[in-house]
Image (cartoon, helix red, strand yellow):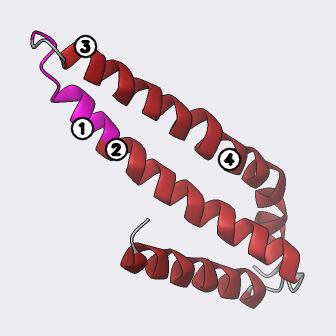
């Protein structure tokens, strides 16, 4: 992750964390967990998008095209099942608490 992208990522984490606390969930560890999961999901999704665009543009008829496609598909697998999935599973456990807090205030 480039330095600019890292700074944007950290700012997004801080913003989400502040929002979670603002809705009344003052547990810092919970707020941080939700914030990191959401920000990391967005980052990994953008990585998958870039990899997928490259995969779809791969010339499968070229000599190295199949090797390149395999590498890109394997990279997509890593992002989906080793980056996105754990964050999504954590959010699935925690998001109900966010919804309940918002519902309590309406």
Which residue matches tag 3?
Answer: 66
For the residue carrying disc 4, how many other residues have a C-alpha within 10 Å: few (<14), some (14-19), or many (20+)?
some
Do labels 3 and 4 touch, CB within 8 Å? Answer: no
Compute the Cα span from label 4 to label 1.
23 Å
The relative height of residue 38 versus residue 61 in the rendered view (above or below) is below
Separation of residues labelled 3 and 2 (CA atoms): 19 Å
Q: Does the magenta stretch include residue 60?
A: yes
Dot 3 or dot 2: first in sequence order is 2
Q: Disc 1 versus disc 3: distance between alpha carbons?
A: 15 Å
Instruction: Determine which of the numbered discs, if any, sits on residue 88 in the image.
Output: 4
46 displayed left or right of 11: left
Q: Marks 4 and 2, Cα distance to the nearest angstrom?
A: 17 Å
In the rendered image, which quarter contains the C terminus?
Answer: bottom right
Residue 13 position, x and y percent, is: 61, 77
Q: Nearer the viewer, mark 4 or mark 2?
A: 2
Find out whether residue 104 is within the magenta segment. no
Dot 3: few (<14), some (14–19), or many (≥20) neighbours within 10 Å? some
* First-in-chain label (4 vs 2): 2
Q: Residue at x 68, y 47 (%)?
A: 88
Tell me whether circle 4 and circle 2 mark residues in contact (CB < 8 Å). no
Q: In this view, does 69 lie to the left or right of 6?
A: left
Q: Is residue 51 above or below residue 72?
A: below
| Quadrant placement of the N terminus | bottom left
Q: Where is residue 55 in the image (x, y as percent from the top left)?
A: 26, 29
Task: From the image, tell me which residue sits under label 2.
Answer: 49
Could you tell me residue 50's position as x and y percent? 30, 45
Lower position in the chain sequence, tag 4 or tag 1: 1
Identify residue for label 1.
53
Q: What stretch is highlighted in magenta?
A: 51-61
Eyeballing the image, is 1 above or below 58? below
- For label 4, the SS is helix
């Amino acid at each position: 992750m480039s330095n600019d992208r890292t700074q944007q990522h950290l700012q997004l984490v801080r913003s989400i964390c502040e929002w979670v606390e603002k809705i009344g969930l003052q547990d810092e560890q919970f707020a941080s967990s939700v914030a990191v999961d959401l920000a990391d999901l967005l980052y990994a999704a953008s990585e998958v998008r870039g990899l997928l665009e490259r995969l779809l543009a791969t010339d499968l008829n070229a000599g190295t095209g199949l090797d390149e496609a395999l590498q890109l598909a394997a990279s997509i697998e890593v992002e989906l099942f080793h980056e996105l999935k754990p964050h999504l599973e954590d959010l699935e456990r925690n998001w109900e608490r966010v919804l309940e807090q918002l519902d309590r205030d309406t």
